[in-house]
């Protein structure tokens, strides 16, 4: 648990602006669920792809079972959320 409190992740400013702009535009359109999915994708990218060396360490191979499990589980969450958010009953 201490690892979560001691890490500092870096996020590029232009990506923060892109997230803010895209979510603002989508919320003005009235698609709150789509904005949630975009936020999830940005968080996933920032936490597990952009800063993977800080989280997993440089000595661990780029792709191992744990990393594949995180990516697979996150992709599954995104797909299920996409289906749930965009499904409209007949």
Image (cartoon, helix red, strand yellow):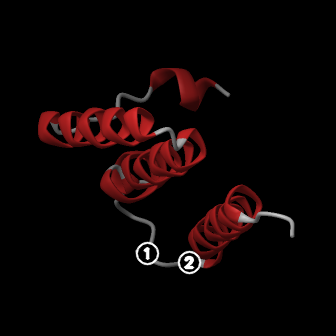
Q: Residue at x 38, y 33 (%)?
A: 28
- Report x, y in % for residue 87: 75, 65
The answer to whether residue 54 is above or below residue 78 is above
The answer to whether 52 appears left or right of 3 in the picture is left
**Residue at mark 2 to residue at mark 1: CA–CA distance:** 6 Å
Residue at mark 2: 64
The reply to whether discs 2 and 1 touch (Cβ–Cβ < 8 Å) is: yes
Q: Quadrant of the C terminus?
A: bottom right
- Report x, y in % for residue 7: 42, 29
Q: Nearer the viewer, residue 37 or 24?
A: 24
The answer to whether 12 appears left or right of 55 in the picture is left
Q: Residue at x 45, y 67 (%)?
A: 60
Q: Quadrant of the N terminus?
A: top right
- Report x, y in % for residue 68: 60, 76
Label 2 neighbourhood size at 10 Å, few (<14), some (14-19), many (20+)?
A: few
Q: Secondary structure at mark 1?
A: loop
Residue at mark 1: 61
Q: Residue extending furthest left?
A: 14
The answer to whether residue 44 is above or below residue 2 is below
């Amino acid at each position: 648990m201490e690892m979560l409190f001691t890490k500092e992740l870096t996020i590029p400013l232009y990506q923060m602006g892109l997230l803010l702009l895209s979510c603002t535009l989508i919320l003005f359109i009235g698609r709150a669920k789509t904005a949630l999915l975009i936020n999830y994708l940005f968080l996933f990218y920032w936490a597990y792809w952009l800063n993977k060396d800080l989280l997993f360490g440089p000595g661990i191979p780029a792709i191992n079972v744990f990393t594949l499990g995180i990516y697979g589980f996150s992709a599954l969450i995104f797909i299920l959320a996409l289906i749930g958010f965009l499904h409209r009953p007949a």
